Image (cartoon, grey):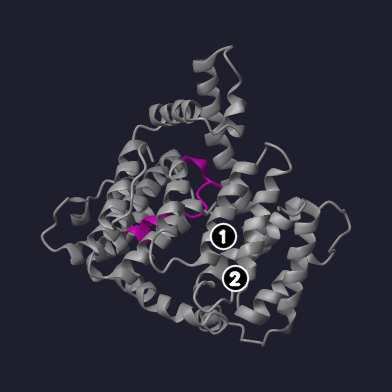
Amino acid sequence: MDLPLTDLDTLLWSSLGEHYTGQIAGSQRARVVAQASSHSAGSAGFVRPRLQLFAAANDPKLRKFRVQTESMLAKAITVKFAAESLQPENPEAAAHEACGAAFWLARACFARHVGDQTQNLNADLASERVLLLLLRAAALLKQDADLRLTCVRYAVGFATNPRYVRSGVVLDNQDRLIELYAKMPGARRSLLSLFRGRLAWQKGQGIRRSGLQVALSHYAAALKDHSHKEHGFDAEAPVHFFPELICILNQARTLKNREGNTLKAVDFITQRNYGIYFDIEKEEALLCAGLKEFADFRDANLAELQKRWGKKKSALEFLHEENRESLHDYQSVVDELHPGAPRYRENIADLKATLGMSVRKGG
């Protein structure tokens, strides 16, 4: 049975309080990996693929591309890579190159919905390239299950992370990517809860307060499992999780004066246990911008859906329905407004087939 929103709020604050007993790890952000590994012994296995991706990003062959993503993004998004071919000559090399390119493109999407809005169009297209390259890399890495899982993990992390500009094509595929990751061997339960929490948080914006309850339930589950030997956080999750947790708690809390030192408390917890420093006000600005981006995406789709339905029924009913006709109508609107969406669904379906997973019709 789901807990009431106020009870979840209390439970999460209580769970956070338990972190005051952790050992001091140090003050350098670079120690996140070491501390996360100590909290979740199984996360050490994540470090090798993570370092492989970092090495791929720093390949000298990608230096020119990196500069383009930083200063000429419009040009960078037109660059094609071997991984985009159905049968590249050297699949493993093509996959590593794609991972490196996705790294720099993702960085170019970070925080672009805050500040200079003229950069959003190129960042939107860059976000689609990030997702495509990571999916293609995963499809090509048939002999490296760990790195393939890491590619999918980053694809889901990127697609669900409100800090990044994400086009409608990317936003539309969040749930499919989460489902894909959930079915892969080695998927971490705590990360699944985080990803599902993010999606529920986005979907709950501007609809009704109870929408936050679903998101809080997932964040509570992620916190509960964070130190599990096999299903706990990997080395990177804490950097994102704690700022998100405090932001969603601030949205959910009902008592005006409750936890007056909230920001200081979370800063203390993350610095003491993980060596993570963050500016909560900047984090909140990025997260809220990403939440609004999703709300705008959904509202535009619903407005078009209402035009199609006319007086037959309200498009808002779609938000509370699961009948296939409504789902099909909504997806048809998404595909019309974002023509690239079907291609990405096909890439996800192809990857599922490669991994021997069953593929739902239309999913």
Q: Secondary structure at mark 2?
A: helix
Does residue 75 appear to the left or right of 211 in the view shown?
Answer: left
Mark 2 to mark 1: distance in Å? 9 Å
Task: List x then y, in percent, for residue 313.
Answer: 59, 17
Residue drawn 71% across the image and 53% down it: 1
| N-terminal label among 2 and 1 | 1
Q: Residue 225 has which mark?
A: 2
Tell me where the magenta segment starts and ends, as one range. 102-118
Magenta-colored stretch includes residue 188: no
Q: Which residue is mark 1?
A: 193
Does residue 353 appear to the left or right of 362 in the view shown?
Answer: left
Taking the view exactly as shown, the residue that stands out farthest to the front is 1
Task: State whether residue 96 is above or below residue 22.
Answer: above
Q: Are marks 2 and 1 in contact (CB under 8 Å)?
A: yes
Task: List x then y, in percent, for residue 13.
Answer: 77, 66
Q: Where, by quadrant of the figure, is residue 82 drawn?
A: bottom left
Taking the view exactly as shown, the residue that stands out farthest to the top is 311
Task: List x then y, in percent, for residue 106.
Answer: 41, 56
Residue drawn 56% across the image and 76% down it: 228
The type of residue carrying mark 1 is Ser
Q: Secondary structure at mark 1?
A: helix
Mark 2 residue crowding within 10 angstroms, few (<14) / some (14–19) / many (20+): many
Task: State whether residue 23 is above or below residue 163.
Answer: below
User: Taking the image as drawn, is residue 27 in sight?
Assistant: yes
User: Taking the image as drawn, is residue 289 in sight?
Assistant: no
Q: Residue 327 has which mark?
A: none
**Image quarter hosting the C terminus:** top left
The type of residue carrying mark 2 is Asp
Residue drawn 83% across the image and 51% down it: 254
